[in-house]
Amino acid sequence: MQILPRLTDSFLGREKELGRLRKFFLRQHLFVIKGIGGIGKTTFALAFLEELKKQKPKKNILWIECHEGWRLENLLLEIDSWLKEAGDMSFSSWLKGDKKDIKEGILFLIDILNKKEFILFADDFHLVQDENIKLFLSLLNTYLNARIVFISREDIPSSPFEKLDIFEEKLEGLPVNVAVNLLKDLLDLHKLSHQPDNKNLLRIAEKVAGHPLLLKLTASLIIARSLDLEEIFSEKAPREIEDYLFSNVLNKFSSNERRILEVLALSDIPIAEDAIKTMLKIKDIKEITAILQRKFLLDRDASGNIFIHQLIAQYMANSMAEELKMSLHRKLGKYFEKIGLSQEAFSQFLEGKELLKASRILAGSASKMYRHGQYELLVEDSNKLEKVLPGINPRILIAKARALYILGKWEQSLSILHRMENIITDRALLAELFTSIAFVYHYRGNMEKAVAFYEKSLKLFKSSSASRSIVSCLNNMALICSLRGEISRSRKYLQRSFEISSRENNMELLAHALMVKGCMHNAAGEYEESIQAVEEALKLTSNRTSVRFTSETRRQMGIAYFGLGKLDEAKNIFEENLLESKKVGHTLATGFSLLYIGIIAWEKGEYREAMEALTAASSNFIGQGSLVNDARTHYYIALNHIDEGREEIAITILENSLETVK
C-alpha cells in the first residue's frame, strides 16, 4: 500500500495561493511550486494533496521525493516503483538494461500516467541534474494529459514559450497576520504562561519575514524559555537572525539528539531510523526522534525515513569538528554500501578519507555507469578520487577513458590509456585496455592502429572466457574490413562472432553482430540486405538497447535508404539520430548525423542547408580530433562549392583534405 506524506498540523494561511491552484488545476497539466528553502513549499503542496485525496483514489496520487545527485534515471526508477505499488503497468523492462532511446522511455511513462489520470508530485525537483531534463519537460508539455506538480527552489529549465502552459506559484514568507496566528497556535498547544504579547509576536513575525521554519524554531525557543527577545529585535541582518535561532536551538540538545542530527546533516538522502540506531548504538531512538520531530528539527519521508531541513543541515555541518565529520562519513558509507547505494557510499567514503574503500566501490560500479550513459558523472568521480589517491585502480581509469572518448575528448582518453600499457600485467585487464585503445583509434579514423590493437586483444583473450570482449573485437574488426572494402575478410570475422554469440545464447551480442553485418552489406552495395540485418538487430535488443548502439544501427539503416535513393526516409533517420545523440552527449554520433544530413541536402540540390550541416559536422569532428572524418566532410563541402560554381575554393579544400589524410 502506498503511504503518502502527512500534512503538518501547523499549516496555516496560503488560502490565496491554494485558491489560484484550485482554479487552474483542471485547465493545466504542469505546475511549479517555487520558493526559497524552508518557505513552506512542501507543506503547501501537501495541503493541496489532502484536498485531492478527497476527490481522487489515493493510489492515483504519487509523491516522489528527489535527492541530491539524482539524474533523470533515478526519478524514473522512483516513479516506476510507485506505479508497481499502485498495481498499474510499470516500465521496468525499459529501465533494466543499458540506456536506450530516452525519448521513447519518457513517452512510455507519459502514456501510463495519461491512462489513469495520475497526479504526480515531485518534491525538491531542483536536485535532479541531468542534460535530459529539458527534453523531459518539453515532452510533458506536449503530450501530458495527467498532472505533475514540481516543487522546486529554482526555475525549471523550460523555454519562455513552454512556460506559457505551466502554472507557477512562487511562495513568499507568510503574511504578518498569518505568521502571528501560526506562532499563537504553536504556543497555545503548550498552554504557556510566559507567552509573548501580541505586539512582540508581531515584531518576531516581521523580523523573520514570515519564514515558516524560522517561525517554528522561534516557537520552540519560546517554549523552552530560551529566547532573548531583545536579541531578536536588535538590528541583525536576516542571516544573523537565522544563525542565532539555529545556535540557540542546537545548544539545548541532549548528547543523543545532537548525534542523530549530526548524522542526518551529512546525508543527502533520508535514512531509516533503525539504521541510525545501529550506527550510533542508541537504544531509545524512537523516543528521541519523536522529540526532535516535535521540535521541528527533523521530518519523515513517505517511507518513514528521517531527514532534517537543508538549512539546519548546513549549519550543523559547518559547526562540526573535522574528525567527527570524517567518522560519520565513514559510518554512512558503510550503511549506503550495505543497502546497495554505490554512488552515495562512494561519496561518503571519499569525504571520510576512506580512499581505498571509495576506490573499490567506484571500480565495481564504473562499468555500469558507463553502460548507463553516466559519462560525465563517471569522469567527475574518477577525477575526485585521482586528486587524493595515487595509483588509482586501472579499471576505473579504463572506464574513465572510455567515457572521455564518448564525450569527444579523444586526446585525453588516449593519453590515459597509453600511460597504462606498461603498468598493467593482468592478461584480461591488458586485453581490455588494448580493446579500448583500438576503439579510440577506430573511431578517430586511424584504422591501421585500431587493427593492431584489436589483434593484440584477441591474442590475450584466447586464454580467457571473455566472450563479450572477444565478440566486440571481432565485430569491430569486421566493421573496419567492410569499410576498407575487404568484404570476404569481414565475413570471416562476423562468422566467428555469430558462432560465439549463438553458443552463449546472448541476444545483445547477436544484435551487435547483425548491426556490423548491416554495415558490411552497405559497403558491398547490398542495401536491402542491410536494412533486413539492422531491423533484426533492433528487434533482438528491444528493451535492452543502449543509445550508442541504437544510434549506430539506425545510421546503417539511414545509409541503406540513402543507397536505395530514398532520401527523405534517410533524412528522417539522421535527423532523429541527431536529436538523440545531442541529448546524451554522444559527440561522434552527432557528427555523423550532421554529415549525412549535409550529404542528403547536397544530393537534393539544397546547397545552403548542405553547407550548414557539413560545416557543423566539420566543427564537431575537429573538436574530437577525428581528422579523417573531417577530411571526408570537406570532400562534400568541396562538391557543394563545385555545384555552386566555386571551383577554385573546392580545389583548395580537396588539396588540404588529401594532405590531412596522408
Image (cartoon, rainbow, N blue to C red):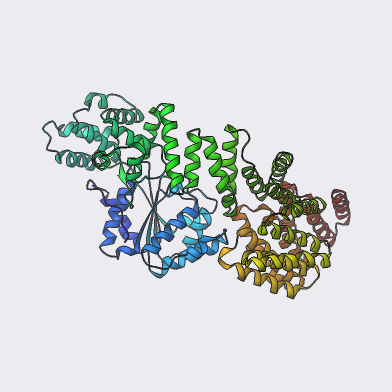
Q: Is residue 383 left or right of residue 530?
A: left
Res. 249 image quadrant = top left
Q: Residue at x 66, y 51 (%)?
A: 406
Q: Against 200, is 267 above or below? A: below
Q: Against 92, is 358 above or below? A: above
Location of residue 541 in the rendering, given as x and y in whole percent from the top left corner: 60, 67
Location of residue 465 in the rendering, given as x and y in whole percent from the top left corner: 67, 57
Count of residue discs: 0
Q: Is residue 135 left or right of residue 225?
A: right
Res. 241 image quadrant = top left
Residue sitting at the far front: 463
Residue 156 or 108: which is nearer the viewer?
108
Q: Is residue 107 left or right of residue 468?
A: left
Residue 216 or 423: which is nearer the viewer?
423
Q: Residue at x 49, y 53 (%)?
A: 72
Location of residue 613 in the rendering, given as x and y in whole percent from the top left corner: 71, 57
Residue 572 visible in image: no
Residue 542 visible in image: yes
Q: Is residue 544 left or right of residue 411?
A: left
Location of residue 636 in the rendering, given as x and y in whole percent from the top left corner: 80, 59
Res. 39 image quadrant = top left
Q: Residue at x 74, y 74 (%)?
A: 529
Point out the image quarter for the N terminus.
bottom left
Q: Against 107, is 38 above or below? A: above
